[in-house]
Image (cartoon, grey):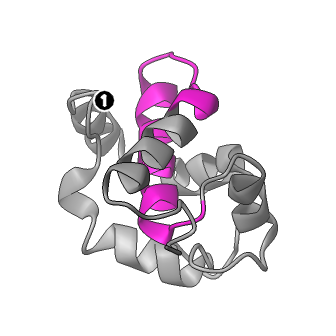
Amino acid sequence: MKNKIPETINGAVDLILAQMTGAEKDLYAKEPESAPGAQFHFGGGMMMRNAWGLWFNKTKLSKWFKKYGVYHGDDRSSIIYKALWCRLNGKKLDIKWEAEHYRRYWAAKGLKPDGGK
């Protein structure tokens, strides 16, 4: 994840891709579309959330997520992993659908998307 904080989701994907080998890209592209990168949640995902400030709304990247109503760092890193999968598979990320997916998830738990009650 280096020390550079990307400003957009496309910038985040660019940084991740720059660190992957061709074989890693091929393997990741074969991940299930429903949860690409799930096995990286506690490793690379944690590093991404912390290094890129995905828990807070102070970076340009986190503010980008906020404008779509995505507040939780875990949700943000999962969407970045989905965007990576989409790029590798020639698909377009539907950020509105992703944001709504996470809003429904939090609502089902009786919580607001920003973690409040």
Out of 4 and 78, give the one closest to the viewer.
Answer: 78
Task: Tell me residue 3's x, y (percent).
Answer: 63, 82
Residue in the picture at 27% in, 74% down:
43
Residue 26 locus on image (x, y percent) = 28, 31
| Crowd rating for badge 1 (residues with CA inside 10 Å; few <14, some 14–19, many 20+) | some
Quadrant housing residue 66: bottom right
- The reply, left or right, for residue 88 in relation to residue 40 is right
Query: Residue 16: horizontal and vertical position, in percent?
Result: 50, 55
Residue under the image location 56 percent in, 41 percent down: 99
In this view, which residue lies farthest toward the top? 90
- Considering depth in this image, is 103 or 90 the residue closer to the camera? 103
Q: Residue at x 53, y 37 (%)?
A: 100
- Residue 24, compared with residue 48, is above or below; it is above
Observer-nearest residue: 36 or 11?
36
Question: Quadrant of the rendered structure where residue 61 is?
Answer: bottom right
Instruction: Please tell me how many numbered marks the rendered image carries.
Output: 1
The image position of residue 39, as x and y in percent, is: 18, 57
Secondary structure of the residue carrying numbered label 1 = helix
Check residue 101 for magenta coloring: no
Q: Which residue is mark 1?
A: 29
Residue 19 visible in image = no
By secondary structure, the bulk of the magenta-drawn segment is best described as helix
Q: Is residue 48 visible?
A: yes
Q: Which residues are magenta?
A: 71-97
Front-most of residues 29 and 83: 83
**Residue 86 lies in magenta, yes or no?**
yes
Q: Label 1 sits on what residue type?
A: Ala
Residue visible at 56% across and 82% down?
51
